[in-house]
Image: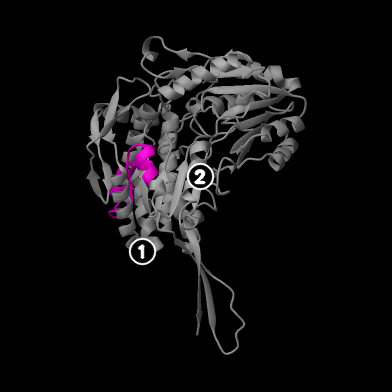
């Protein structure tokens, strides 16, 4: 990213709160600690990492390799190719542990979960270094990912505490000669499965796992095949905090076998999945085939728009659009993949976005000067080639459009940040989530047209706006999305944080209508029971 000239501001580590919005001006000590952790992580490449079932390390006969998208020669480690049997063992352990865990006082559970958050804090630089190497996430976004995991756990604890365990005295029946008492209580469901994605392996594992455990459920968590190391380290943080055996179980293996066994099992009482719309809807339908309805919390991606008014601050808009389009190589469900600009400022905005984008440093994301690392794997890399070839026939590339294969890039999956204009709005890629560093820009005659185009999507996750205060109020009123931002240079559509911008989507982007890291999320992991006693 470009750096503004002028007097350099400094921050001490004690007054710096890391979020995705503050990550652009960290204290120097943060970099020093990351560098030291990075060296230690690289010294530990190639180890075999077990699953964690009922408090014990478990290995399988078959293994799979975890290699870095930065350089495929880097063998990060080997992991267990868990089977249906391992899924059943983990679920059985969780079921056995549930009675004791659920009957503990909520205060007792909170003590352990807050210890888990502190364990994450202690290992934050180590885990961030692993995220950078395993995902291809730049160091600041990697640090944000793991810091958010700890904050999501703490936020769930704070919500349970603020609501005093969700035990509420209800009204008194007008019964003559009797003394009735009615109490509402939220109680855990039972065994919960968390299936997490590759792009936020820390936050989108630690967040739902923390909420499920705080609520009193027991958990089996399964990471994406591309990111098992990060989630293994998270499992160790929970274990080392004193979470009892069987309360949290960690399994690795193919989604088609082990993952499917978790989804199909009647032992499971609830599930949280983050990933693609197609897989999420498949899980939703399969899970509905059980004996009775069970809670299904899905976050299924987005095709996120930003709208730029003729009254916008162009510098703010350009900065926010570039950061949200190309952070994590566009591999965020919240990435800004569509931009609608009023014609009077269209050329000015597009020229400025292209100018900033051309200066983006692409390379090894552990390097502090690099903003964009590689995409996650060969399949996604090939998708970039396929989509850019299709877009080259429909529009014009202002930047990018090619993969990078020279020198140090030859053994990784590096793609150029790509801005496309002139694509007819009838083109299918205006609606398909590409999950790549590709952003499409389109001029509009007025804001009403922009809003109609922005809402013309099966998704409704995030959205951004740049314009006047009055226009921003209109935008909030009319946009169909769960997380919305106005006039934000830190990111047009990205950068949610627990307690600040709770994260969740509408329409095809989510199933619950409640946002993680917000006031109403923890309750999704519990069901209500009414206690009535007549004296």
Return the mark for residue 104.
1
Spatial CA span between label 1 and label 2 = 28 Å
State the image coordinates of residue 20 (x, y, percent, origin top left): 50, 35
- Nearer to us in this view, 306 or 264: 264
Looking at the rendering, the stretch of residues picked out in magenta corresponds to: 233-261
Compare marks 1 and 2 and give the one earlier in the sequence.
Answer: 1
- Nearer to us in this view, 111 or 106: 106
Compared to residue 450, the image places residue 176 above or below, namely: below
Of the two numbered discs 1 and 2 in the rendering, the one whose residue sits closer to the viewer: 2
Residue 68 in view here: yes
Q: Residue at left 56%, top 72%?
A: 170
Indicate the quadrant where residue 501 lies.
top right
State the image coordinates of residue 2 (x, y, percent, origin top left): 53, 19
Total residue callouts: 2
- The secondary structure type at the circle numbered 1 is loop
Residues tagged 1 and 2 counted as in contact (Cβ below 8 A): no
Q: Which residue is mark 2?
A: 298
- Nearer to us in this view, 28 or 331: 331
Left or right of 319 on screen, residue 424: right
């Amino acid at each position: 990213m470009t750096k503004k000239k002028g007097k350099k501001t400094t921050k001490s580590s004690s007054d710096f709160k890391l979020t995705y919005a503050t990550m652009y001006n960290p204290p120097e000590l943060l970099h020093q600690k990351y560098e030291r952790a990075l060296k230690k992580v690289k010294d530990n490449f190639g180890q075999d990492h077990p699953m964690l079932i009922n408090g014990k390390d478990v290995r399988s006969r078959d293994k799979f390799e975890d290699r870095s998208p930065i350089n495929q020669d880097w063998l990060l480690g080997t992991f267990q190719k868990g089977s249906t049997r391992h899924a059943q063992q983990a679920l059985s352990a969780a079921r056995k542990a549930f009675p004791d865990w659920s009957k503990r006082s909520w205060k007792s559970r909170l003590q352990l979960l807050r210890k888990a958050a502190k364990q994450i804090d202690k290992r934050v630089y180590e885990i961030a270094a692993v995220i950078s190497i395993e995902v291809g996430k730049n160091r600041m976004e990697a640090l944000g990912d793991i810091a958010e995991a700890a904050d999501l756990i703490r936020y769930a604890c704070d919500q349970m505490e603020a609501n005093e365990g969700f035990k509420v005295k209800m009204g008194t029946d007008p019964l003559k000669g009797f003394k009735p008492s009615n109490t509402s209580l939220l109680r855990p469901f039972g065994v919960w499965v968390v299936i997490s994605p590759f792009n936020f392996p820390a936050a989108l594992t630690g967040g739902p796992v923390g909420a499920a455990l705080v609520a009193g459920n027991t958990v089996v968590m399964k990471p994406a095949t591309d990111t098992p190391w990060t989630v293994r380290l998270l499992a160790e943080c929970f274990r080392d905090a004193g979470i009892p055996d069987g309360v949290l179980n960690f399994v690795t293996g193919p989604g088609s076998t082990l993952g499917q066994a978790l989804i199909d099992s009647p032992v499971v009482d609830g599930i949280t999945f983050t990933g693609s719309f197609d897989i999420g809807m498949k899980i939703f339908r399969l899970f509905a085939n059980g004996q009775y309805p069970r809670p299904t919390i899905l976050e299924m991606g987005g095709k996120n728009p930003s709208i730029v008014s003729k009254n916008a601050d162009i510098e703010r808009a350009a900065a926010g659009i570039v950061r949200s389009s190309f952070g994590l190589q566009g591999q965020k469900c919240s990435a800004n993949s569509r931009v609608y600009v009023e014609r009077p400022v269209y050329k000015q905005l597009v020229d400025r976005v292209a100018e900033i984008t051309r200066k983006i440093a692409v390379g090894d994301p552990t390097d502090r000067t690099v903003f964009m690392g590689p995409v996650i794997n060969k399949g996604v890399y090939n998708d970039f080639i396929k989509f850019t070839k299709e877009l080259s026939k429909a529009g014009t590339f202002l930047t990018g459009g090619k993969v990078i294969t020279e020198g140090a890039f030859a053994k990784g999956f590096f793609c150029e940040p790509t801005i496309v204009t002139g694509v007819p709005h009838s083109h299918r890629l205006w609606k398909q989530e590409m999950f790549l560093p590709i952003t499409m820009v389109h001029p509009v005659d007025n804001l009403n047209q922009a809003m109609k185009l922005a809402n013309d999507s099966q998704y409704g996750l995030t959205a951004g706006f740049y314009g006047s205060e009055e226009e921003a109020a209109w935008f909030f009123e009319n946009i169909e999305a769960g997380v919305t931002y106005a006039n934000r240079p830190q990111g047009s559509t990205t950068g949610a944080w627990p307690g600040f911008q709770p994260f969740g989507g509408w329409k095809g982007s989510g199933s619950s209508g409640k946002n993680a890291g917000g006031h109403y999320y923890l309750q999704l992991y519990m069901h209500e029971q009414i206690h009535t006693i007549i004296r």
